[in-house]
Image: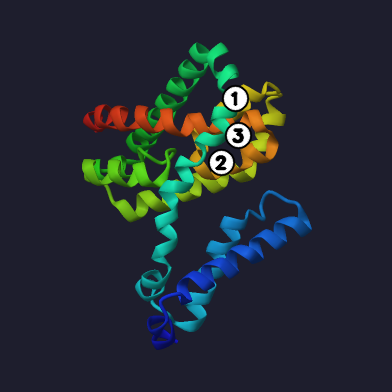
Amino acid sequence: MNNLVMSSASFGVAISLLAYYAGVQLKKKFKLGIFNPLLISIILVMIFLLVTHVEYQTYYSGAKMLGWFLTPATVSLAIPLYSEVDRLKKNIKAIMISIFVGSLTSMGCILIMSLLFGFSHAQFVTFLPKSITTAIGMSVSEELGGIVPITVAAIVITGILGNVIAESLLKLFKIEDPVAKGLAIGTSAHAIGTSKAMEIGETEGAMSSLSIVVAGIITVIGANIFAMFL
């Protein structure tokens, strides 16, 4: 099987897309947050690699081209934001303060947990960028001396968890304002969470898209400051 995967440049892509398609179908059938397509696809690909004894690097060599779409996909989130530019102008101060506080809270929680569990500096900075998009988070982690593969895993898990539980948490805390919903999801769960925000509503999706950009900038600056605390 390793030879088959290595001989085909698109085999890894095919496996990834099929796994994601299976996740989409499960989500449509059961309509439960736990059946997040990305989560399901990750599990299915892991099972495939274990059962067929295909090495991860072999699979990744064929699937890495999917990663090339990450940056343009993130940039395209500016489209719904443009449609809500008037609402953005009216609430600009509240929006910026909310994202700023949310980003600092995320990094502050990582600092507290790192102190409680006795993390090393490398472990601490590995988790600092967990709530921003992967492309930025990887760079932050690498620059500060973190463990980049674990950073990627933390970012993905954070996004999936946010996608799965966001709607339930909003209902639990009775958050009904669409702007507040979008800001909360985007600041805490980056692009994966934003896909859920877009499902909830256009305004939610636009505000979540904005949060990804602003939270990313704040975290890039803030992480360098927080990194000095441990």
Which image quarter is the N terminus in? Answer: bottom left
Residue 205: which numbered mark, if any? 3
Question: Does dot 3 land on a helix, a strand or a loop?
Answer: helix
Image location of residue 132, percent across then percent down:
42, 38
Q: Are marks 1 and 2 in contact (CB under 8 Å)?
A: no
Q: To which residue does mark 2 refer?
A: 193
Q: Is residue 207 visible?
A: no
Label 1, residues with CA under 10 Å away: few <14, some 14-19, many ≥20: some
Residue at 63 percent across and 38 percent down: it is 198
Q: Is residue 156 visible?
A: yes
Residue 64: which numbered mark, if any? none
Question: Does dot 1 land on a helix, a strand or a loop?
Answer: loop
Q: To which residue does mark 1 refer?
A: 84
Give left or right: position of 99 versus 203.
left
Residue at 68 percent across and 41 percent down: it is 199
Image location of residue 56, percent across then percent down:
39, 72
Q: CA distance from mark 1 to mark 2?
A: 19 Å
Q: CA distance from mark 1 to mark 3?
A: 10 Å
Point out the frontmost of discs 2 and 3: 3
**Residue sitting nearer the eye, 100 or 161:** 100
Image location of residue 55, percent across then percent down:
38, 77
Indicate which disc, 1 or 3, sits on the residue closer to the N terminus.
1
The amino acid sitting under disc 1 is Glu
Q: CA distance from mark 2 to mark 3?
A: 9 Å
Give left or right: position of 171 versus 55.
right
